[in-house]
Structures are given as C-alpha cells and as structure tokens.
Image (cartoon, rainbow, N blue to C red):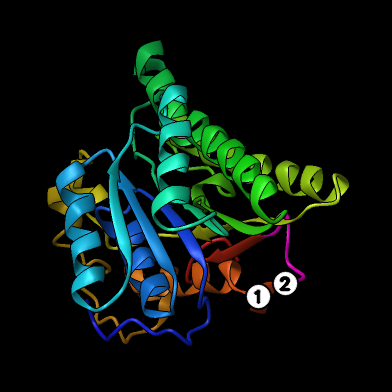
Amino acid sequence: MQGNCSSGGRVAQAIALVTGAASGIGRATALLLAREGAKVAVTDLDAAGAAATAGAITDAGGSALAHAIDVTEESAWPPLLDRIHDELGPPTIAVHSAGISFAKPLVEMTLAEWRRVMAVNLDGAFLATQAAVRAMRRARGKGAIVHVASASGLKASPGATAYCASKAGLIHLAKTAALECAQAGDRIRVNCVVPGGVKTPMWEGMANWNEMKQSAVWNANPDGPPGKRFAEPDEIAAAILFLASDESSYLTGSALVADGGYTA
C-alpha cells in the first residue's frame, strides 16, 4: 500500500464497505479510501485476497476488517452488515465492485451461463444496494453508494451479450435506487462509475487473454493518452472516491463515465 492512512482525508471518519476488494478496482478503492481516512470492510469471495488487502491497510496504520462473502447469497448480507456495525461502526459508504466478465456468442451460451453472469453482476448488486440502504437508514439516513458498472453497459460488444446486459441493468438499478432514496427523504446518494478497459486480473480468464496481454494497448505507457491505453485501477478508484465523498454531494443517479473516450 502506498502512503499512510490519514485521519484528515477526503473521507475521514467514514465507514466503508467494499465488495470485490481482493484485487483490481475493488482493492485499489479499498486502499485509497483507507488512505483518505475511512475505516474499510474489505469483502470478497476470495478470503485470502480480502485478508491481504485488509492487512495492507492495517500495516499502513488504518482500520480494516476482512470478510469472505458470496454476494449472490441473500443470507450472507445481514451477518456482514452486523459485523461491520459492531467492529467498525455504521456504514456510510458502500462500493460494490464485485463482478465477473464473460464472453460467448449468444447462440452458443447456455442458460446456466447467462444466469451465472446475472447472479453475480446484477443480483449481487441488488442485494448490496438493499443491504446498504437499510443499514444507512438505521444509522443516520445518510450515505453514498457507488457501483462499478462498465462501458459495456452503454455500448454493446458482440460476443458479450450477458455481460453487456448485466452492466446496463446495473446502471439503471443504481439510478432507480437513487430516485427511491430521494423520494423517501433519505440523504443516501447512489451513483455508478462506468470504466472502459482496466488492467485487472479479470481479463486473465478471457478466451483472448494471450492475445490481449501482447497488445499495444495493454502494454502502453500508463502516462500515455487515455484513449490509447487501458486504465490503471487507481484511476478508477479516484473516480469512486469522488462519488463516495462529500465533494459529489449533489450527484445522485449519475453514471460517471471513465472510459478514456471509448463511448464518446
């Protein structure tokens, strides 16, 4: 972890829940929130990875707990929120980064494969949002929820039907949740960050991984033009931090696009 945790940062005194925090965008976000003063509940299906992220936070002087969770299991959410409340305090930030990638032509995809993508990317987001809103209402009626969507939810990609559909649904889930919270009089904001290609381990499971890792775009200098390279996880984490902080106090129901111009 780079830098020390700050008691006077941009999310000082916040209690943050981050899903999918063992690697990639989720890990970068958990580390950045901690550096900016938040206490962080680091969650992932990968228990060892979650523990490693939490350990990096505590080693830097921050406060964190690690918790393994399958985001698709409804019964797993109440114990997680209870533990966060008991060990860190009532959550004021929830970042839902857990998700899977999947690519297969529509006519070759099985219903089971379709449902697996929807379960993780959409059902998990529904359960995360529901749990976060309930917890924030019980505590202070205030908070910030940020979902990690994808440019594939805005621009279709051949061969990625399930993934595109799940991310498009996620964007509208967040927008609708934002309107419902506002209608109820909550001070709970719900937004999405919409990345394009990001250099994360998720790509390693794709069929074209060997070709991709040798491409000019994958290997481009991270200081190069945004449209000519993949984003670094820290760049997306910075956008998430903005949406989670009071700096974005008037943003709710928004989809903050951070895709290097891909959907422009």
Labels 2 and 1 touching (C-beta < 8 A): yes
Looking at the rendered structure, the number of numbered marks drawn on it comes to: 2
Residue at coordinates 43% horizontally, 78% vertically from top-left? Answer: 37
Label placed on residue 161: none
Q: Which residues are magenta?
A: 249-254
**Residue under label 1:** 246
Q: Quadrant of the C terminus?
A: bottom right
Magenta segment, principal secondary structure?
loop
**Residue under label 2:** 249
| Viewer-side residue, 192 vs 11 | 11
Is residue 230 visible in this depiction of the protein? no
Is residue 6 visible in this depiction of the protein? yes
Residue at coordinates 59% horizontally, 49% vertically from top-left? Answer: 154
Q: Is residue 183 above or below residue 199?
A: above
Q: Is residue 252 magenta?
A: yes
Please provide percent x and percent y for residue 238: 46, 75
